[in-house]
Amino acid sequence: MNINNYECDGQMSIEDFLVSNNQEVKRLLHSGEVVFEAIKGDVERHVVTDEHWYIEHLKTYGNRTRVHGAYGVVLDSNIGNRVFFEKEKAEKIAEIYLQNHEVIRASEINPIETVAYSYKTITTGKKMMAFYSVLDNGMVYVKGFTTFEHLMLKEHAKKEIKKFIERQEFKYSNPKKIEYIPKFKNMYRIKMKYDWDYAEARHSYAVG
């Protein structure tokens, strides 16, 4: 007996099972639609792409999106919760988070000096950029070539700048100093023992 071809009477195939389950849940997002997601106290704009898939254990669809020039994912089940068609609704949820957590808002960040470097990767030609900004309160705001944007308290600023200059990219990739005006992000307090004091919303430890 060929077990690969064996079927019992009335048995549902895997293909039939997936189709029947997909039909039970209506997809809520479609290609080209724009939605806004509240990420802690930030709001991100997503453009839905054609790519989507059904997540059986969550009984919802996952949707591939374009966000900040990269790819993201939005679940149908998050619509009306943290994902909205109206930007104002996402901003309302985000503002509640900001008011109830330890966050330094982007509008409160005032640089007095910014130092930035960039280089292009040999393999892909992608432009890589890093910078640090010394703030008027003595803190330092940092973005490494491959790190999240983060913020260090005044007492940790000098050490962080030293670490910035000692990054391996300066040894192997020969970055050039450039003029750069940063667009700062909200900074969320990291309350556990960690290398950074604050970081941007997407960092899992930066809860505020």
Image (cartoon, rainbow, N blue to C red):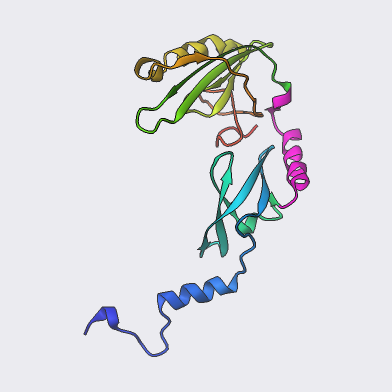
At a point 73% along the width and 24% down the height, the residue shown is 107
For residue 153, side relative to residue 160 (left or right): right
Q: Position of residue 132 (x, y in %)?
A: 56, 16
- Position above or below: 46 against 184: below
Q: Position of residue 55 (x, y in %)?
A: 51, 62
At a point 46% along the width and 15% down the height, the residue shown is 176
**Can you name the residue that lies furthest to the front here?**
125
Q: Position of residue 154 (x, y in %)?
A: 61, 12
**Which quadrant of the rendered structure holds the N terminus?**
bottom left
Question: Residue 137 is drawn in which quadrant?
Answer: top right
At a point 66% along the width and 39% down the height, the residue shown is 40
Q: Main secondary structure of the magenta part?
A: helix
Front position in the image: 191 or 107: 107
Front position in the image: 89 or 154: 89
At a point 64% along the width and 28% down the height, the residue shown is 185
Q: How many marks?
A: 0
**Can you name the residue that lies furthest to the left here?**
1
11 in the magenta segment: no
Residue 42 seen in render: yes
Residue 82 seen in render: no
Question: Residue 76 is drawn in which quadrant?
Answer: bottom right
**Can you name the residue that lies furthest to the bottom here?**
9
**Which quadrant of the rendered structure holds the C terminus?**
top right
Q: What's drawn in magenta, residue-wise?
A: 85-107
Q: Position of residue 70 (x, y in %)?
A: 53, 41
- Position above or below: 56 against 23: above
